[in-house]
Image (tube, rainbow, N blue to C red):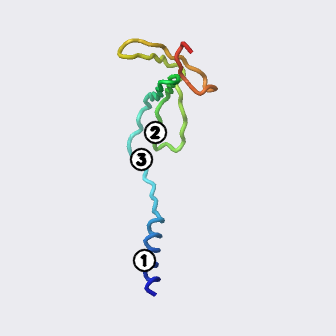
Amino acid sequence: MKRVSLYIPAFIILAGLFSSCEKVIEFEGEALEQKIVLYSVLNPDSLIDVYISYSHPIFDPEFSYHQIVDADVRLFRDDSFIDTLTYRPPATVKDYVPSSV
């Protein structure tokens, strides 16, 4: 009997932990304008990957990717120009790559 009395509170606590309540809270702020987002991956042993797009609202239920394909991307190191990156269509993995490739 003592064992059963230990299992009942443990079961109630576990049931309370695994159940949840959910309440949708609508965003009441003003809509923000889109910003330009630059995402880049720099690895010493591979090509430079640069992805440029517009931001999207976090509360927007429908995600749509707005890629910028006509950007002028220039690569600098310590204020000295290195290379201009050119756009490659999405058929390849990388979007903007160095011109020398």
First-in-chain label (1 vs 2): 1
Residue extending furthest toward the right = 91
Which residue is tagged 3? Answer: 27
Q: Position of residue 84 (x, y in %)?
A: 48, 14
Q: Position of residue 45 (x, y in %)?
A: 50, 24
Question: Which quadrant: the C terminus?
Answer: top right
Q: Are marks 1 and 2 in contact (CB under 8 Å)?
A: no
Left or right, residue 52 beside residue 79: right
Q: Amino acid at mark 2?
A: Pro
**Figure label count:** 3
Which residue is tagged 1? Answer: 9
Disc 3 to disc 1, C-alpha distance? 39 Å
Q: Are marks 3 and 1 in contact (CB under 8 Å)?
A: no
At mark 1, the secondary structure is helix
Disc 2 to disc 3, C-alpha distance? 11 Å
Which residue is tagged 2? Answer: 57
- At 44% from the left and 17% from the top, the residue drawn is 75
First-in-chain label (3 vs 1): 1
Q: Amino acid at mark 1?
A: Pro
Q: Position of residue 42 (x, y in %)?
A: 46, 26
Location of residue 26 with respect to 1 vertically, above or below: above
Disc 1 to disc 2, C-alpha distance? 44 Å
Location of residue 2 with respect to 72 vertically, above or below: below
- Mark 2 nearby-residue class (10 Å; few <14, some 14–19, many ≥20): few
- At 54% from the left and 12% from the top, the residue drawn is 100
For discs 2 and 3, the disc positioned in front in the rendered view: 2
Looking at the picture, tell me which residue is in the foreground, 83 or 45: 45
